Amino acid sequence: MAGILFDGRSTPAVLVSNTAQTLLQIQAPANQRVIVRNIRASGLDASGSANLPVRYRITRSTSNFGTSSTATPSKRNPSDAEAIQSTCKQTFTVEPTSPTEDGAIYISPQLAFGEQGQWEIPGGQSLQVEALCPSGTPTVECWITAEE
């Protein structure tokens, strides 16, 4: 660990009713552990909707990371000379398969949550945040702060 803090952020995603969608994934570089310090998510439900809770699930994968677009991580301290080696992914067209659950929380899409902790991602593996709403189509997004 070199103490380089960085943030990964997903673009706002509209959930499809009763379909799990990975919002953001952090993949550690080979042979280098990454520590996730904070996970945050928020959302907005359409006016007049049932405002049903969204399940945010933290999962891990050792392979089969899915197919997605790159989310550009940003350093907390822009003067750090080292490049961020981790990969951030968003907008999944193919979801990660067979992830292991590492926790879940249900909250209203109108609220935000922040989960502080320490999730270690071993080299070459990933941690992702998945969202699911049983009914309705709220717009949600996610931020992860991690350290290399």
Image: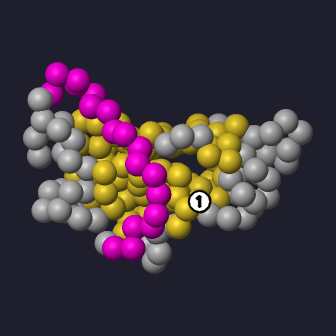
Viewer-proximal residue, 45 or 82?
Answer: 82
**Residue farthest right in this picture:** 48
- Give the side of residue 9 with respect to residue 21, left or right: left
- Give the side of residue 99 with respect to residue 135, left or right: left
The residue shown at (24%, 36%) is 5
Residue 79 is one of the magenta-drawn residues: yes
The residue shown at (64%, 59%) is 132
Viewer-proximal residue, 114 or 146?
Answer: 146
Q: Identify which amino acid the numbered label 1 is placed on.
A: Gln
Question: Where residue 128 appears, x then y in whole percent?
Answer: 43, 57
Disc 1 target residue: 21
Question: Where residue 104 appears, x then y in whole percent?
Answer: 53, 59
The residue shown at (68%, 43%) is 139
Label 1 sits on a secondary structure element that is strand
Viewer-proximal residue, 18 or 37?
Answer: 18
- Give the side of residue 52 with respect to residue 69, left or right: right
**Which quadrant, please, contains the C terminus?**
top left
**Residue farthest bottom in this picture:** 98
- Give the side of residue 110 with respect to residue 48, left or right: left
Image quadrant in which you'd find residue 143: top left
Q: Which residues are magenta?
A: 63-80
Image quadrant in which you'd find residue 16: bottom right
